[in-house]
Amino acid sequence: MLDTKKIWNIPNLLSLIRILLIPIFAYCYLTAETAKEYYVAAFIILLSGLTDMADGIIARHFHMITEFGKFLDPVADKLTHAAVALCLAFHYPLMRWLIFLMVIKEGFMAVMGAWNLKHGQKLNGAKWFGKVCTATLFLLLLVLVVFPWIPRKTADFFILAELVIMFLTLILYIPEFQKLHKKWERRPL
């Protein structure tokens, strides 16, 4: 029987709020015509980021970490990042390459994570380089939403920098999964 108190605790509700903010952001950003309207969209993303920080702090401080929360939090992150990147792709064509790499990286992580779970192995949380990638991606997305008048060359430079960071993150995760695979191969039958 599921313990609903463990599933619907404050951190998990904050993650759910982040997911619910996605269509509100998309509507606000895609229909924005004035600086004030873009700032409303930026405020929604900032609010989403603050709830992301809050859910982690609350979960750790009040011992509210759940398996459901370990699943829901990164899903909320990925959905938010993908939605913002898709919206930005309407204004910044280079963003499409970042979306393509996001799909490759997250697809790799999902497939390898599922394969390793099937064999009783899993990564012990995000690695430092994964956290850096997530933080720089969030910062890039926030900057491009907050400053819609940023020169195209400047935006493209930042997008290219994030492409490099994300590509390196993908490369750095490969040996992490190889270690798990080797550990699985050495286990006694």
Image: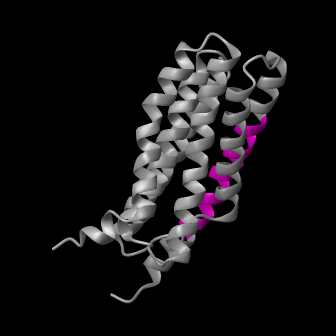
Name the foreground residue: 140 vs 20.
Answer: 20
Judged left or right of residue 90, residue 150 is right
Q: Residue at left 45%, top 62%?
A: 11
Name the foreground residue: 73 vs 121.
Answer: 73
Q: Residue at left 64%, top 31%?
A: 42
Res 66 quadrant in image: bottom left
Up-down relation of residue 180 to residue 21 (above or below): below
Q: Which span of residues is magenta-colored?
A: 161-178
Judged left or right of residue 35, residue 62 is left
Residue 53 visible? The answer is yes
Up-down relation of residue 156 to residue 141 (above or below): above
Q: Position of residue 167 (x, y in %)?
A: 68, 44
Name the foreground residue: 131 vs 97.
Answer: 131
Tell me the chief SS of the magenta region. Answer: helix
Res 172 quadrant in image: bottom right
Q: Residue most toward the left?
A: 1
Q: Residue most toward the bottom?
A: 188
**Magenta stretch encompasses residue 51:** no
Image quarter where the N terminus lies is bottom left
Name the foreground residue: 181 vs 111.
Answer: 111
Say how the picture is coloured. one colour
Number of residue marks = 0
Q: Position of residue 84 (x, y in %)?
A: 56, 31
Q: Residue at left 64%, top 21%?
A: 38
Q: Residue most toward the front?
A: 36
